[in-house]
Amino acid sequence: MMIPKSTNTDLVTDMIGVLLVDMVTINYENAQIKWILRKDPEKSYSLKKPRRFNFLKGISNDWCSILKMQCKLCPKCIKTPNNGTMNEHHMETIHEIEMTPYKTVWNEIKWYYLEKLKEIEKKKDITKRLRRDDFINYWNEMLSKIKEDTEKKLHDFLVMTR
């Protein structure tokens, strides 16, 4: 992905869509099952798979652009003790600029995905699945507006600092 190294680690693991602790636990249990099967191949066991989520399904590159803008180091504060990323908290407290927080946007993306998943599970129809078009239609316009707003505010801020 095209996101900065300074992006919050919890957010990155969330975007991957697998809980790392669950994955390690399942790998451990599968290794034990495989060992038992090596000793006694006549037994039958089924291996487990971690549950995966694709929260970024249908999400445009505007999301990466928002992250790039809000997770890079602040050029005005880079040589000061306030050195921090240009996230909404830093920009509001230090520079008095209000922005839409990327964490709020991410929580909305996750909520929408999980709600769509619940709708499908309620219908109990095996042929139904999450459609990419639903996410594209819902998120493209919103993410582009947030991106444009953030770009404008950060551009004005960066022009003022020169």
Image (spheres, rainbow, N blue to C red):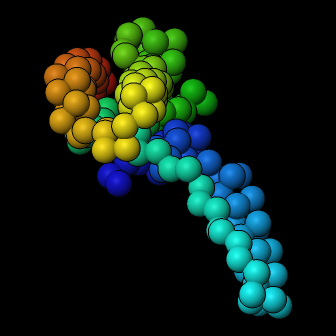
Percent position of residue 99, x then y: 36, 15
- Residue at horizontal 22 percent and vertical 30 percent from the top: 134
| Residue at the extreme front of the image, as rendered | 42
Percent position of residue 84, x then y: 53, 32
In the picture provided, is 35 more to the left or to the right than 135?
A: right
Asked if 89 appears above or below 116 in the picture, the reply is above
Residue 64 visible (yes or no): no
Percent position of residue 38, x then y: 76, 90
The picture quadrant where one finds residue 131 is: top left
Percent position of residue 60, x then y: 22, 39
Nearer the observer, 101 or 50: 50
Q: How many marks?
A: 0
In the picture provided, is 33 more to the left or to the right than 59?
A: right
Nearer the observer, 48 or 57: 48
In the picture provided, is 77 more to the left or to the right than 2?
A: right
Image quarter (top left, top right, bottom left or bottom right) of the N terminus: bottom left
Nearer the observer, 156 or 46: 46
In the picture provided, is 81 more to the left or to the right than 125?
A: right
Residue 98 visible (yes or no): yes
Image quarter (top left, top right, bottom left or bottom right) of the C terminus: top left
- Residue at horizontal 69 percent and vertical 67 percent from the top: 27
Nearer the observer, 39 or 135: 39
- Residue at horizontal 50 percent and vertical 21 percent from the top: 90
The picture quadrant where one finds residue 104 is: top left
Asked if 44 appears above or below 149 in the picture, the reply is below
- Residue at horizontal 25 percent and vertical 32 percent from the top: 135
